[in-house]
Image: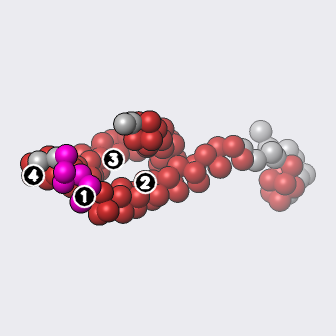
Amino acid sequence: MTEVGRSSLQLVSDSKPARLVQYFTVFSVTMGALSFGTHLGFMSPAKPALNETLNAEEMMWFSSIVNLGAMTGGPVAGLLINVLGRRGTMMASVVLSLAGWALIGTGN
């Protein structure tokens, strides 16, 4: 409900912003770029060390899995945007990204 006799500037300045949602949204956008860049940067120095433990086919999968994720992630993100909206989709994706990095960090 709008108040009669008050300007838009007064109404906006009196409202309390939802900063937690804004911070989480910015964090999720940043994590998306950081996650993708880290994955691409991680593969290059890790390949020589992994050549000792992985065979040629497993190395091929290790190198191309990010492309498979991008191929399936695009259509899935498009569907989620229709359901959750842009902000909701970004916020949901950061949960998956953090879970993946937690698995990487705690793995042997």
Q: CB of mark 1 within 8 Å of CB of mark 2?
A: no
**Mark 3 to mark 4: distance in Å?**
34 Å
Q: Which residue is mark 2?
A: 35
Q: Amino acid at mark 4?
A: Ala
Q: Which mark is residue 56?
A: 4
As for residue 10 lying within the magenta part, the answer is: no
Q: Amino acid at mark 2?
A: Ser
**Mark 1 to mark 4: distance in Å?**
11 Å
**Looking at the image, what colour scheme do you see?**
secondary structure
Q: Nearer the viewer, mark 3 or mark 1?
A: 1
Q: Position of residue 22 (x, y in %)?
A: 65, 49
Secondary structure under the numbered disc 3 in the rendered image: helix
Of the residues under marks 4 and 2, which one precedes in the sequence? Answer: 2
Q: Which residue is mark 3?
A: 78
The one of 51 and 39 positioned closer to us in this rendering: 51
Q: Position of residue 80 (x, y in %)?
A: 38, 40
Of the residues under marks 1 and 2, which one precedes in the sequence? Answer: 2
Secondary structure under the numbered disc 1 in the rendered image: helix
Q: Quadrant of residue 21?
A: top right
Residue 89 shows in the view = no
The one of 15 and 27 positioned closer to us in this rendering: 27
User: Which segment did they paint magenta?
Assistant: 48-53
Q: Amino acid at mark 3?
A: Gly
Q: Quadrant of the N terminus?
A: top right
